[in-house]
Each structure stands twice: as structure tokens, then as C-alpha cells.
Image (tube, rainbow, N blue to C red):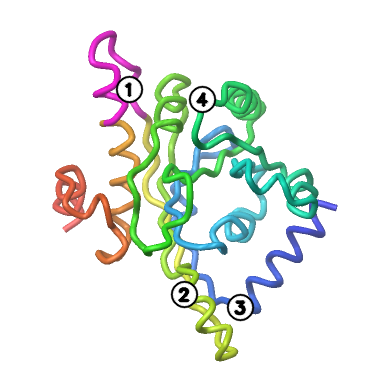
Amino acid sequence: MKKFIVWLIRFIIRLVARVDVRGYENLPKGGGFVIAVNHLGFLDAPLAFYGLNDWNLFIPVAEKWGDYAILRWLAKHLNAIFIDRFNPDLKSMREMMHRMEQGQTLVIAPEGTRARDEKMAQGKPGVAYLAAKMGWTIVPVAMIGTEDRLVIQNLKKLKRTSINIRAGESFTLPPFPKANREEKLQEYTDEIMCRIAVMLPEHNRGYYAEHPRLKELLAEKA
């Protein structure tokens, strides 16, 4: 059933979008790593199965979507995890760690929800905490052109949307120091988000547009 659903997702995406994916060389061999991605629109999650067709991936999904039977069914067959975005969810965190130990690939948007204003919001610290604690490799990925407004406008015109997916170089976060852990957690979260933002158009960078770390990364890229 999963293979059929993924095939259907890829078929539908080809109907509504022209997708250019670059950066496969930055993905570690095998699984057990994190793909951290910005979240602009409703196509972002399906695009994970488009761009990573041959990977054993899983995606955390907001618990509110579990209220819909069809989405619970899809989540079951697509290996998703329902999480509480607003409270510590130890059960889900343990499940993520278990799946990573099995070699699965975690695809997660640190923002926690899609950017309705089409700009990056401040990242939540959950993935940075787990990645630093467990030593997980992180691959930053930028989704460009998936804004709901653009996709819907083009659908009304029977026009395909141009979407670009860019994967940056993989990296790991150092273990947490004994002191200033909260400060360091914020620094680690900003590091992940800025590595995504550097690949985005300026108008999508939002909260991180003027971040000092982003300016450093832009200077290195120039």
C-alpha cells in the first residue's frame, strides 16, 4: 500500500509542479540522519516522498491532523508520527530516537507549522536538542516556490508551479556543554535555521533575514 500511495503522490506532484531537486550528493550514505527543512506550504510534506523516493523516511505531523480518519490512515501507511507541538512529548521523542536507531531518515520542519506569511518563523529547539544529544547528522534543505498562494494561483490557471529543492552540506552539532545549556540550544537551533535560510530567496528568510550567523554563511558563499 505504501508503494502505491507514494506513486500516487509523485504522479499528482508531476501534474501540478515542475520540481528541480539538487544536492543529493550531500545526503549521507544509508539512513539515520535528519533532513531539516523550511515549511512554506501544503506541498512540502508530499514533496519529501517525491524527492526521497528511495529512502526509508518518516515525518512528524501535528497531532491536530489525527482527528481526521483519512489522515490517520495516510499517516499509518506513510510512517508518520503524530506529535504535540506545544508541550513536551516524550513518547514521540522516544519513538523518533528508536526509528533513527533503525536507520530511518527523519524529515522535520523546525518551525513547527507552515509559514502563512511566506517567511521563515523562529525555529523550535526540539530537533536541535535531539541532534546534539544523539550525535545525528543534519542535512539542511530549502523548499523554494511551494507557497500555497502560488500553487493555488497556478492551479486556477491550469499552470504547473516551478519548485526548487536544494540540499546543503551535512553537518553535526557539538554535544551540549555543562553550563549555559539553554543559550547553546538556541545557538544550535539558529545554526540549523540559518543553514536553511542561506539557500532561500531573501524574501523568504523572515525571522532570520538579519541574523548574524546567516550573514556569516552568505559571506562564505559569496
Which amino acid, mark 3?
Val
- Residue 205 x/y as whole percent: 28, 57
Q: On screen, 166 above or below 113?
A: below
Residue range corresponding to the magenta coloring: 173-186
- Residue 206 x/y as whole percent: 28, 57
Q: Considering only order in the chain, which callout, 3 or 1, is on the residue closer to the N terminus?
A: 3
* Residue depicted at 29% across the width and 38% down the height: 191
* Residue depicted at 45% across the width and 61% down the height: 40
Residue under pointer 1: 174
Residue under pointer 4: 88
Q: CA distance from mark 3 to mark 2?
A: 14 Å
Q: Residues within 10 Å of mark 2 (few under 14, many from 20)?
A: some
Marking on residue 16: 3
Residue under pointer 2: 149
Q: Considering only order in the chain, which callout, 4 or 3, is on the residue closer to the N terminus?
A: 3
Element under disc 2: helix
Element under disc 1: loop
- Residue 46 x/y as whole percent: 62, 59
